[in-house]
Image (cartoon, grey):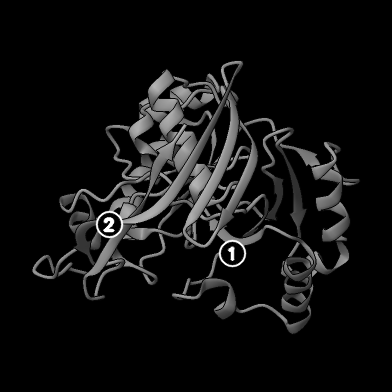
Amino acid sequence: MAVDESQPWCTRASEAAGEPIAGTAAARVDAWLLLEYRGAWASKAWESAEVSPAVRAHVDAWASATTGSRIQLVRRRAEPERLALYLVSSQQAQPLAARFELTDHDAIVGFDLVAATAALRAGTLPVGAQPVARPLVLVCTNGKRDRCCAKWGLPVYDAIAERGDVEAWQTTHLGGHRFAATAVWLPEGLCYGRLTPQSIGTVVDAGLRREIDPLSCLRGRTALSESAQAAECAWRHEHRALGFDDVVVDRDDEHDDHGEIEAVVQGRRVHARLHAEPTGASAPPSCGKPDAAIVTWRRVGG
């Protein structure tokens, strides 16, 4: 189907307005449920997925009982006979992912998802799970949520999938489609934006070395608040701290539009206060929406 290029794209508008990317990842998310779903995705993908009431109730109960939880539907080009279910803990101290295979979606009711997530958070592989040897890279391609995700996300997903050295999946809404192509690297929970097929090789090569490069694509670590994400990004730029664990945030206090953050950066204790402030520019938060003021986290100390 032909794409109407005459309508403005929120991705282009955001970049043209100079919207900062740091501190824009989904915040305080450190427990992920990834469910392979091969049907069509609606704008509200999980809410509209064609699964039985028992499956929906079981997964929703996990989300309600698990702090920092997020549900993602995933798919890929190849479709093996069994469906994949991943549970992931993206706590920085010991990120860990587990894979289960399902004969169908109804089989998920037989898994104690809450107990399995608790095991992962404790650094233990749940009973019956398969270890995940390679990183999971999820690229948002849900054009029904925002057309930018399909336009920019699909070429990036294809470029990653062709490599064969990470587990590449298309996924539903990650948040911030104006930063498409967006992706999350699991189990560490590192969220990227404004990815292109040309830049993805550098990003994945660095990730396989447990590094972040280029830093300009890092939106933030999802386990943190937005202000802590912004602080981590700033410290990484200042110290050229590329390693996944070169910055460890151990104090993350965010209230309303203020954040008080402490971390260890390459062995050095640092502190920052941040405040959410308008940049003076505006752009649509998504395609078809009116312009809105752009707000970013600015450091006012440390």
Q: Viewed as shown, does residue 163 lie left or right of 91?
A: left
In the picture as drawn, the residue positioned furthest to the top comes out as 267
Q: Viewed as shown, does residue 260 lie left or right of 285?
A: right
Identity of the amino acid at label 2?
Lys
Hey, which quadrant is residue 301 in on the image?
top left
The residue at 21%/63% (across/down) is 283
In the picture as drawn, the residue positioned furthest to the bottom comes out as 53
- In the image, residue 22 sits, relative to residue 13, either above or below, namely above
Counting from the top left corner in percent of width and height, residue 231 is at 47, 38
The residue lying toward the viewer, choosing from 300 and 3, is: 300
Is residue 219 in view from this perspective? yes
Q: Viewed as shown, does residue 99 lie left or right of 222?
A: right
Q: Which residue has dot 2 on it? A: 151
The residue lying toward the viewer, choosing from 291 and 44, is: 291
Identity of the amino acid at label 1?
Tyr
The residue at 50%/27% (across/down) is 207
Hey, which quadrant is residue 200 in on the image?
top left
Q: Tell me the crowding category of disc 2: few under 14, some 14 to 19, or many 20 or more residues within 10 angstroms, Cα based.
A: some
- For the residues labelled 2 and 1, the Cα–Cα distance comes to 21 Å
Contact, mark 2 vs mark 1 (Cβ under 8 Å): no
Q: How many marks?
A: 2
Quadrant where the N terminus lies? Answer: bottom left
Q: Which residue has dot 1 on it? A: 37
Q: Which numbered disc, 2 or 1, marks the residue closer to the eye?
A: 2
The residue at 77%/50% (across/down) is 100
Q: Viewed as shown, does residue 52 lie left or right of 162?
A: right
Helix, strand or loop under label 1: loop
